[in-house]
Image (cartoon, coloured by chain):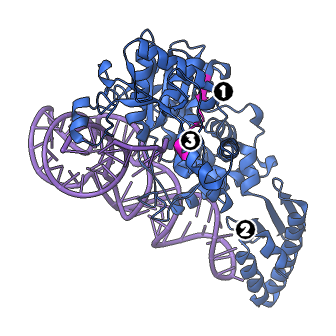
Amino acid sequence: MTIRLTNSRTRRKEAFEPIRKEDVRVYVCGPTVYDRAHIGNARPVVVFDTLFRLLRHVYGADAVTYVRNFTDVDDKINARAAATGRPIRDITDETIRWYNEDMDALGALRPTHEPRATEYVGAMIAMIEGLIRGGHAYEAAGHVLFRVRSYAEYGALSGRSVDDMIAGARVEVAPYKEDPMDFVLWKPSDAGVPGWESPWGFGRPGWHIECSAMSYELLGESFDIHGGGLDLQFPHHENEIAQSCCAHPHGTFAKVWMHNEMLQVEGKKMSKSLGNFFTVRDLLDQGYPGEVIRMVYLGTHYRKPMDWTAEKAREAAGTLRKIAIFLNGDPLSREWVDLANAKPTAEVVAALSDDLNTSLALTHIRKYLKEGREADLVGSLGLLGFKAEAITERFAAVSFEAFDNGIVKGTTVRSLGDAGGEVTRRFNELGKRLEFLRSEAMESKNFAAVDAMKTQLLAAGVEVRMSKSGVELVPGPGFDAAKLEALD
RNA sequence: GGCGGGUUGGCGGAGAGGUUACGCAGCGGAUUGCAAAUCCGUGAAGACCGGUUCGAUUCCGGUACCCGCCUCCA
């Protein structure tokens, strides 16, 4: 299976050939840790998690190294500390913990390494010294600046020329810069702002150098894939390339560059001022399971702008519910399959291998569901980052069934997942009562009591299904156990 | 001002130069105390203008519109 990926550097879809197939190396720019990750932050996490899973599938779990950094030195963090009076380390530690919790909920595997920038300041200083020695950087007014004109390829990734950008006149002008495009590698720190001793005095690194230093330390001067959001393409990635290639001229830095498109909310750019800004935690707290969020993300190809809408979340939840109900179906009614060893199908692997066509992969998933191909479904869901057990627990907590086939009368209670014994007991009780009322109504032709109870159950988010052979209660998307308890 | 991306049926969203995408919604039917669920069936598309071609929604060019980046941003 050949993996094909769109390489931002060449703007083409290319066959992916790792430098060493027993050691595939990926670097993705991670978050600046000063606040909860918003849903835009989560898109690259899910996109590159899917890539990580695909690479592990193709090359072997031990053959892939995935590095995603935490930027824990940044002026936004300093500002947050100043505003709250909290120590920086408290803020960054807490934010990292939150980040991992939230991304875990989305089914993202932890990267192989999650380096913190502050642990690599020494490596950054060493790299900057090398750049100065090579004539690619200079010290001025306590700052160290990268000399953009010293790197002829500058702008190649994002398709810009230095001259055009200066003409655009949207660059920070500073008197100490040789050229307006030059960017900061090191800057001085006052007291009260984090800093480290360096050959240029007490200071802190500029933003871009950390990724160059950490990717070099953990992956070497040449590695396979570098990813991130499209907004990072310029200037961040452009500057990374300039720094790394000038500091390590024998390396190629990243062979393939991948950028995910941005995320919108209900057709608009997500922003605090529009009131459509929310974090992953907000969605989880609102009752959107992580699986739903993940499925919404995977429904749009990573190189297209993605719109988060409530409607998409509703559809994804519906699909996951159907999967849960199917997987919880009567095991006696179908062939036994070895789910523990279920493997993704070739066509799902092929879809992902074609530049991560997750949308097509989900189409295949729906087909397996429709055709009842349990092993293919479970195996393929696994490659996409969905655990079958998690889906069944989340989407089909409890159901009750009573039946009367004319010969035998009885009840069946199915407890699915770990919804708790109390809810199960309650379902059993309510289901039996409904079945009783219904059988009476069938005689008397007066359905008032049945309808009243049904209305209450529906209000509690319970789907009521009545067929000739019985009734079934299934908790729906808006299931509310508290309302169920209040029901009499 | 510079750079990049997009425009597919009511909505979301893919593939393929000629053969059904798929899902949701709709419509018709089966089923149903009513309904839900389920099953069966079904209509509906490719912004606009040119070009290449026997044939393009799919390739090329242009126009329009939309979006993003260029400033912290994923």
Q: In the picture, which chain is purple?
A: B
Query: Which residues fall within the magenta stretch?
Result: A65-76
Residue A50 appears in the rendering: yes
Q: In the visual, does A305 lie left or right of A201?
A: left
Position of residue A430 relative to residue A372, above or below, is: below
Helix or strand or loop: what does disc 1 sit on?
loop
The shade of chain A is: blue
- Residue topped by disc 3: A32
Amino acid type for the residue under numbered disc 1: Thr
Helix or strand or loop: what does disc 2 sit on?
loop
Q: Are marks 1 and 2 on the same chain?
A: yes
On residue A435, the disc is: none
- Locate residue A84, reporting x and y percent: 64, 55
- Residue topped by disc 2: A479
Q: Nearer the viewer, mark 3 or mark 1?
A: 3
Q: Nearer the viewer, residue A158 or A109?
A: A158
Q: Disc 3 sits on a residue from what chain? A: A
**Magenta stretch containing residue A322, yes or no?**
no
**Residue lying furthest top:** A250
Q: Disc 2 sits on a residue from what chain? A: A
- Residue topped by disc 1: A112
Amino acid type for the residue under numbered disc 2: Phe
User: In this figure, what is the number of numbered marks?
Assistant: 3
Helix or strand or loop: what does disc 3 sit on?
loop
Q: CA distance from mark 3 to mark 1?
A: 19 Å
Q: CA distance from mark 3 to mark 2?
A: 36 Å
Residue at image location 86% in from the left, 62% down from the top:
A413
Q: Quadrant of residue A461?
A: bottom right
Check contact, mark 1 vs mark 2: CB within 8 A: no
Q: CA distance from mark 1 to mark 2?
A: 38 Å
Q: Quadrant of residue A460?
A: bottom right
